[in-house]
C-alpha cells in the first residue's frame, strides 16, 4: 500500500541517517519543509519533498492535509506504564504536607504499588496496561519504553515483563522493555539490601534473560534505595546478558551515579533534577543520553532538570514522561513538551528534538525512528490546523492532534 499525503503545511524534523542525536546549539535547529508531500509505502517513509514534485500516479491512496502540519510521532523513553491500581491517596498526602520520603517510609510509594501488583492476576494487569497504552498512542506516542520494577519478587517481575511482551505483540507502537528489579528493597528484605541485590542478580536477571523479556536493565540509584556500588554490581552482571543500562539517578541527591553510569556505557541517565559540574563533565563527549522527566517535577513539586544549563554546556537532552502511578500519572508527551518549554526554558525546537531524535537514541531506535527520513518507520503525527509548531507547547491545555499514524496505518 502506497499512501501519498499532500498539501502538508509544514513537514517537521527532516533529517538524513547521519543524525543520531543532537547536542548543545544543534538542539535549537528544527529542519522543516513548507508546502510538502510525504509518501508512505506499507510501514515505511518512502519519499517526501516539495509539493510540486509529488507523484500522484504511483499512489494507491491520496490524503489531502489541507495545510495541516506533519511530524514524527513522539518517543517516550522512560515509563512505568504497567502497574496495578493507582495511588491517589498519596497525592492527597502530599497536599497535606508529607514528602515523597515520608510517604515511602510509612509503606507508600513503590512498595505500595508492588503489593498491589503482586496481588493482581496477569490478565487483569494486561487489561489495565492496555488502556493506558491506547491512551498515549492516541496522544501521539509512537514508541515507548516500559519498565518492570513494581513486582520486586521473581514471580511478579516476570509477570510484568510478560505483560509488556504481550503489549509488544498486540499493538503497533514500538515497545522496548526494561528490567527494573532494583527499584526498591521489598519489605521481605528490609534492612538487608545486599540480600535483595543477590536475588535481583542471581535469580531475576538470569530468568529475564532466559525468556528474552528485556532489552535494557535499570536501577534506582538514590539515597535510601540503591547505592552506586549496587548499580555497578548490577551493570557488570547485566553485560553477560547483553542488556544495556538505563539508570535512574540524581532525582533527589547527587551520589556519583552519573559518572559511574557513563563509565559503564549506560545508554541513558534519567531524572537529573539536580546535577553538578562533575556530572556535566562526565556526560560531555560520552555516548550516554541525559533524560529529563518534567511531569515528575510538576506533579510532586521537586526541582526541574536544569535543561538550559545542560544544553548551554553542550550536552544533548531527551524528554520522557516517567508515566507511573505515584509521581507522574500521565503519559501525555504533548504536556511533557509544553512543561519543558514553560518550566525548563527550552525552546519549542529543543523540546521537539528532545522528544523525537534524542528520545529515539535513548531507546536505541535512532536508525529507525524519530525523524522524517527515507527508510524510517512511518510513525507520524498530523496536527490540527495550527498557526505554527510553537503553538503545540503554547496551547498546553489541548492536544492539537488530528491523526496518529503508526506503522503506516491511521489509528
Image: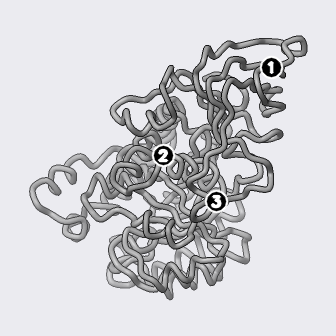
Q: Contact (CB < 8 A) between labels 1 and 3?
A: no
- Locate residue 194: give its quadrant: bottom left
Q: Which residue is mark 2?
A: 348
Q: Secondary structure at mark 2?
A: helix
| In the rendered image, the vertical position of residue 315 relative to residue 166, given as above or below | below
* Labels 1 and 2: the sequence-earlier one: 1
Identify the image quadrant of the C terminus: top right
Q: Which residue is mark 1?
A: 52
| In the rendered image, the vertical position of residue 256 relative to residue 63, given as above or below | below
* Labels 1 and 3: the sequence-earlier one: 3
Separation (CA) of disc 3 from disc 2: 14 Å
Residue 247 position in % (x across, y down): 52, 70
Q: In the image, what residue occupies the spot 56% across and 69% down?
A: 315
- The answer to whether residue 267 is visible is yes
Label 3: few (<14), some or many (≥20) within 10 Å?
Answer: many
Please indicate whether residue 121 sits to the left or right of residue 281 in the image: left
Please indicate whether residue 361 sits to the left or right of residue 261 in the image: right
Q: Secondary structure at mark 1?
A: helix
| Mark nearer the viewer, 1 or 3 | 1
Question: Which residue is situated farthest in the right direction here?
Answer: 58
Q: Which residue is mark 3?
A: 22
Foreground: 268 or 146? 268
Identify the image quadrant of the N terminus: top right
Separation (CA) of disc 1 from disc 2: 29 Å
- The answer to whether residue 159 is visible is no
Amino acid at each position: 500500500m502506497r499512501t501519498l499525503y499532500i498539501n502538508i503545511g509544514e513537514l517537521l524534523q527532516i533529517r538524513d541517517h547521519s543524525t543520531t542525536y543532537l547536542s548543545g546549539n544543534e538542539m535549537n535547529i528544527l529542519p522543516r519543509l513548507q508546502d510538502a508531500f510525504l509518501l508512505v509505502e506499507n510501514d515505511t517513509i518512502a519519499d517526501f519533498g516539495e509539493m510540486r514534485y509529488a507523484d500522484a500516479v504511483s499512489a494507491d491512496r491520496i490524503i489531502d492535509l489541507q495545510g495541516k502540519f506533519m511530524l514524527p510521532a513522539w518517543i517516550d523513553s522512560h515509563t512505568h506504564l504497567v502497574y496495578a491500581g493507582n495511588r491517589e491517596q498519596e497525592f492527597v498526602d502530599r497536599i497535606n504536607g508529607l514528602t515523597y520520603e515520608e510517604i515511602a517510609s510509612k509503606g507508600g510509594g513503590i512498595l505500595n504499588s508492588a503489593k498491589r501488583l503482586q496481588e493482581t492476576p496477569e490478565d487483569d494487569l494486561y487489561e489495565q496496561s492496555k488502556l493506558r497504552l491506547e491512551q498515549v498512542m492516541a496522544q501521539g506516542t509512537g514508541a515507548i519504553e516500559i519498565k518492570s520494577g513494581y513486582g520486586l519478587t521473581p514471580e511478579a517481575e516476570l509477570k510484568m515483563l510478560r505483560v509488556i511482551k504481550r503489549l509488544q505483540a498486540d499493538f503497533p507502537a514500538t515497545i522496548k522493555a526494561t528490567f527494573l528489579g532494583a527499584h526498591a528493597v521489598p519489605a521481605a528484605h528490609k534492612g538487608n539490601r545486599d540480600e535483595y541485590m543477590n536475588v535481583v542478580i542471581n535469580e531475576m536477571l538470569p530468568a529475564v534473560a532466559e525468556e528474552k523479556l528485556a532489552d535494557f536493565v535499570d536501577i534506582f540509584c538514590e539515597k535510601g534505595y540503591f547505592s552506586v556500588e549496587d548499580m555497578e554490581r548490577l551493570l557488570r552482571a547485566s553485560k553477560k546478558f547483553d542488556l544495556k543500562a538505563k539508570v535512574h539517578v540524581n532525582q533527589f541527591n547527587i551520589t556519583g551515579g552519573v559518572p559511574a553510569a557513563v563509565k559503564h556505557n549506560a545508554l541513558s541517565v534519567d531524572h537529573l533534577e539536580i546535577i553538578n559540574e562533575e556530572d556535566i563533565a562526565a556526560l560531555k563527549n560520552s555516548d550516554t543520553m541525559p533524560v529529563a522527566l518534567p511531569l515528575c517535577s510538576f506533579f510532586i513539586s521537586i526541582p526541574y532538570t536544569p535543561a538550559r544549563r545542560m544544553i548551554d554546556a553542550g550536552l544533548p537532552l531527551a524528554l520522557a514522561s516517567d508515566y507511573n502511578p505515584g509521581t507522574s500519572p500521565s503519559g501525555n508527551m504533548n504536556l511533557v513538551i509544553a512543561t519543558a518549554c514553560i518550566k525548563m526554558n527550552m525552546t519549542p525546537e529543543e523540546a521537539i528534538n528532545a522528544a523525537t531524535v534524542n528520545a529515539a537514541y535513548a531507546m536505541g531506535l535512532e536508525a529507525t525512528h524519530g525523524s522524517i527520513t527515507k527508510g524510517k518507520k512511518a510513525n507520524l503525527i498530523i496536527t490540527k490546523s495550527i498557526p505554527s509548531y510553537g503553538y503545540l507547547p503554547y496551547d498546553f491545555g489541548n492536544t492539537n492532534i488530528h491523526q496518529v499514524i503508526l506503522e503506516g496505518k491511521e489509528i
